[in-house]
Image (spheres, rainbow, N blue to C red):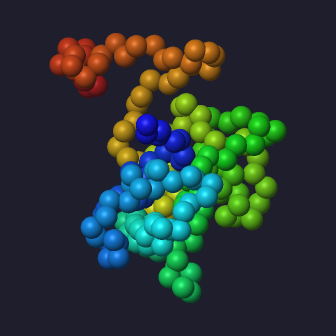
Amino acid sequence: MRLERLGRPEVKNILMSENGVDTANKIVDLRDLYNEEDPFRLGPTYLDAYRSRLNANLGFFDGLDGKLDWPAQPDGTHPLTELLLADFLVVDAAKPYAEDSYFEIEWALLEGREYTTCGGRSLNDDVIDTLYTLIVNAGRGPRVSDGVDGTVLALREFPYLAPANPYPPEQAATIPKAPANR
């Protein structure tokens, strides 16, 4: 039996993927190995490989905007490696809910301040953009987008299902065009 655990969205697909920058692990696809681990107790067998991949990929993503926002520690470790290696969502139910609370607890930890929301992930939070913004510019620049925007928002009451898209992709050609402004 195979179980898919839920951690932070896309850690294994984005941060553990082979981007050609991890010189120590060119052959092994670490994503499935990482996914099979207990997120609270990573085993020693591949731990150094996971760290190597994260250090390499996080450095790669940090350089995409042409500036260094996350200088490596003296031993070469990326400052986010250990935080992201522990791939589980943190939620504090004693704090108030917020639509954009993804990584709020982690941001507060990194900034040395108290967090103000429950953390975790809301249905409507664009968590991939939040992840990209964290790893590319440390939140010190514009929001980094994955290019997927404009989804229909979930409802705020159970069952949370958004209304159907009136123009699914297969009907894109039939979408009424707005008149051009003159």
Asked whether 94 or 99 is in front, the reply is 94
Residue at 51% of width from left, 17% of height from top?
161
Q: In the image, residue 87 lies at what x, y percent?
A: 56, 53
* Residue at the outermost right position: 94
> Which quadrant does the C terminus fall into?
top left
> Is 75 displayed left or right of 151 in the figure?
right
Residue at 32% of width from left, 76% of height from top?
23
Q: In the image, residue 176 lies at what x, y percent?
A: 25, 14
Residue at 29% of width from left, 19% of height from top?
168
Residue at 54% of width from left, 31% of height from top?
124
* Residue at the outermost left position: 173
> Which quadrant does the N terminus fall into?
top left
> As displayed, is residue 42 above or below residue 74?
above
Q: Can residue 38 be seen in this view?
A: yes
> Is 8 displayed left or right of 107 in the figure?
left
Asked whether 124 or 33 is in front, the reply is 33
> As displayed, is residue 67 above or below residue 125?
below
Q: In the image, residue 13 lies at what x, y percent?
A: 39, 51
